[in-house]
Amino acid sequence: MSYHDMEMRAVYGLTLCELMEHDKNVLCLEADLSKASGTNPAVCTAFPENFINVGVAEANMIGLAAGLAREGKIPFCASFTCFASRRVYDQITISVAYANTNVKIVGTAPGITQGPNGGTHMDFLDLAIMRAMPNMHVYSPCDVYELRAVMKYMAAHHQPTYMQLLRPKMPVVFNESFTFDPNKATKISEGSDVTIVTTGYTTHLAINAVEQLKKEGIKAEHLHYSSIKPFDEDLLIQSAKKTGCVVTVENQNIIGGLGGAVCEVLSEKLPVIVKRLGIPDAFGEVATEEYLLNKHGFNVEHIITACKDMIKSK
């Protein structure tokens, strides 16, 4: 099956079905948003006994998932990022992370991709608060093939995990042969002038920026991090040592997320200048992605400008 032209959420649902075919312990838990997550009708039709809709009760979903995990099940719990992280943070802290239960939490429509639903449903903090939690692994795949690889890894490894799930169709970066290793970031392009670090949604933006910079004779090295925790420090340090400056780009508040992880590593092990692009400590609003990218300063043009500024500052 080709996943090239499919929405990310559709691939999420189909991959869950594939995992259930191989292991009946894999479960799908939803809190009344299964159509938005891509599991209705895919999972609930093909595997009704593995599908649990708890209703509008996200905290109950996490508690139920923790109990099921203690009995050997592998629950994938999905909801909007604001509900899958912020609303249930205490339940995740105690019943999942502290208890070290094998629960997989999936936050859908992260950051500005929740635009039509406005500020209350637009969570810019999930990567930051989840990576601060002991025992928690935090992933953010950028395309359908990386999503499939990450999900297969999640199902095969016993650990509390939080994964961002982009819902729409995204530009394809990898292919079916991609293998996921949470301890290794991916070097998308080689360069020597500036390092660009991205995750999830922003990776395709940086790819476009790198191509435009190349036309101007600027060689940007692009590192994609599908895993925010654990975090591949070695590749970042190697790249920063070569280029001498770093630009991070994330669909998140720049405090505590990807940019925070990069600055924590470099400030302690290789101090270089860093420019963080993303949401500058603000709440969301009802708007298009294009408008929000421009307003908050992390579209392709902003990435290009930041790279040039960093090169001049060296």
Image (cartoon, grey):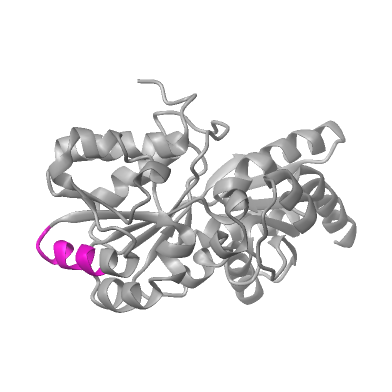
Q: Can residue 210 be seen?
A: yes
Position of 185 with respect to 133 (left or right) is right
Which residue is the extreme one toward the left?
71
Q: Nearer the viewer, residue 208 or 194?
A: 208
Q: Position of residue 242 (x, y in %)?
A: 70, 54
Above/below status of 265 relative to 151: below
Q: Nearer the viewer, residue 11 or 313?
A: 11
Query: Which residue is located at x 66 percent, y 67 percent?
Result: 283
Above/below status of 147 relative to 103: above
Position of 310 with respect to 276 (left or right) is right
The number of numbered badges drawn on the structure is 0
Q: Position of residue 35 (x, y in %)?
A: 38, 42
Q: Position of residue 226 (x, y in %)?
A: 49, 50
What residue range appears in magenta? 63-72
Q: In which quadrant of the rendered image does the C terminus lie? A: bottom right
Query: Which picture quadrant has residue 65?
Result: bottom left
Q: Can residue 230 be seen?
A: no
Query: Which residue is located at x 62 percent, y 62 percent?
Result: 119
